[in-house]
Image: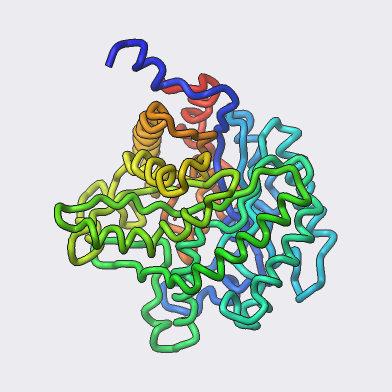
Amino acid sequence: MDEREEDTMKTFPNGFLWGASTAPHQTEGNNVNSDFWANEGRSPGMEFSGDATDSYHRYREDMQLLADAGLNSYRFGIEWARIEPRPGMISRAELAHYRRMIDTALEFGLTPVVTLHHFTNPKWFADEGGWLGAGAVDRFRSYVSAATDILEGVPWVCTINEPNMFAMMTGMARLLSDPEARKKWTSPTVEGERRQLPAPDPEIGRILIDAHHAVRDIVRENTGAKVGWTVANRAFEVRPGAEEKAAELSYVWEDLYLEAARGDDFVGVQSYSAQWVNTDGIEPYPPHPDNTLVGTAYRPDALGIATRHAWEVTGGVPILVTENGIATGDDTRRIAYTDAALRALADAMNQGIDVRGYLHWSLLDNFEWGHWEPTFGLIAVDRETFERTPKPSLSWLGEVARRNGLE
Ligand code: IFM
C-alpha cells in the first residue's frame, strides 16, 4: 500500500457521524411501566435497574459532555412504556419530554438518531401476549404513529433495536413464567466459555419483520427521516468444511433480519466480537485473559467482518454503525479496541462500502440487562450521586471526531 492509499484509509467522509448510543431502560431509571422492570429480580443473580443513571433527568448533562468532547451525534431511544402507559392512552407529557431531548441534542449540534423500540415493551403489552399476541403489530403501529408527531428534525430513525437478539430474548422471556427455568436465568447479553445463547426463533423474527415494515412506512409518511433497523452482527468465521452449517446459522441469527432491511434507507450495524462456526455449530468463546466482561473474545476486527457481511446481504444498503464497544474496566483497552475497530471499518469503507457514521456503545456505564458489572461507557457514573466522570476514551473519540480521521 503506498502512502497516499494509507492516508485515504484513515480519513472519513465529510459529514460522517461520530457519536455514542444509549437506550432508555438502561439509562433513564424507573421505567416502571415496562415488562423488563416487572421481571427484574425474579431470578437469582438478576439485578435491578432502579434509578439507572437517572438520564431521564440528566440527559442535558449527558449530551453536553458528548458535544464538549467533540462528537457530533447522539443515538438515544424513546420508551414505549412511558409514552403509552395504558393501551391507547398516549402521554402528551412524555412525548413532550422526548421532544425536549431532541431539541437539546439539536441545540448542542448533535445529530439525533432516535430508536423507537429497544428491548422493552409496556407491561400491558406483555400481558396481552406481547409480540406473540394477536394484534401485536397493530399495537406497535399505533404507538409509532403517535411517536412520529415529535420527530420533526430527526434525520435518522431506528425502528427496532437488534430484532435478532430481541427475538431470542422474547423466547427467553417465555421461560420466566416457569419457576424452574427462572432459577437458571442469565443475562441475554452475557455469553462466555460455557454459555451459548439460544438461537432466535425465526417465527418471532418474522413478526418483528412485519412490525418493522409496517412502521417504516409510517415514519416515511410522517417525517423526513431516514429509517432502518439495527441488527446485532455475529461476525461468524467459518472453519473449513463448515460452510453449510455457517450459512444455516447465519440465516437464523442475522441474515433473516438483514434481508428484511433491503428497501430501508440504512441498516444499523452493531458489532462487538466475532465467533467461529464449525460443522457442529457455533464454537464457544475460548477462555482467554483478554475476554471481555460479558465473556466475549477481544475481536475489534469484527466490525470489518460485520460491515462487509451486512453490505453483502442487504445488497448495498447504506450502513450506520449504531453500536460498537467493549465491556471492560480498563479504559486503555477501550481505546485500543476502538482504534482497531475503526481501522477495520476504514478498510471496509476503502473497498467501497457506504458507511455514514460510527456511534460507540455506550456513552455511559449503564444497566446491562440484569447486570451492572459489565461497563461499556465512555463516561463512568456514580450510582448514588449520579456524578458523571468522563473517561480518557471519551476525549480520545472526540479527537478522532474533530480530526474526522485516525492518527
Ligand atoms: O447493552 C446492549 C444493548 O442494549 C444492545 N446491544 C448490545 C449492548 C451490549 O451488550
Q: Residue furthest right?
A: 92
Left or right, residue 219 beside residue 314: right
The quadrant of the picture occupied by the C terminus is top left
Provide residue 164's location: percent of width, then percent of height.
46, 62
Answer above or below: position of 337 versus 114. Answer: above
Q: Residue furthest left?
A: 240
The type of colouring in the image is rainbow
Above or below 292: residue 42: below
Report the quarter where the N terminus lies: top left
Residue 82 position in % (x across, y down): 72, 65
Q: Position of residue 300 (x, y in %)?
A: 33, 40
Looking at the image, is 273 positioned above or below residue 398? below
Q: Nearer the viewer, residue 225 or 196?
A: 225
Residue at (30%, 44%) from the top-left corner?
299
Left or right of 303 in this view: 264: right
Is there any visible trace of residue 332 in the rendered image? no
Where residue 248 sits: x, y (%)? 31, 63
Q: Is residue 250 visible in this depiction of the protein? A: yes
Tell me what residue is drawn at x 27 percent, y 53 percent.
275
Q: Which residue sits at x=34%, y=17%? A: 6
Q: Which quadrant of the figure has residue 46?
A: bottom left
Residue drawn at x 44%, y 50% is 375
In the picture as drawn, the residue positioned furthest to the top comes out as 3
Residue 262 as seen in the image, left or right of residue 276: right
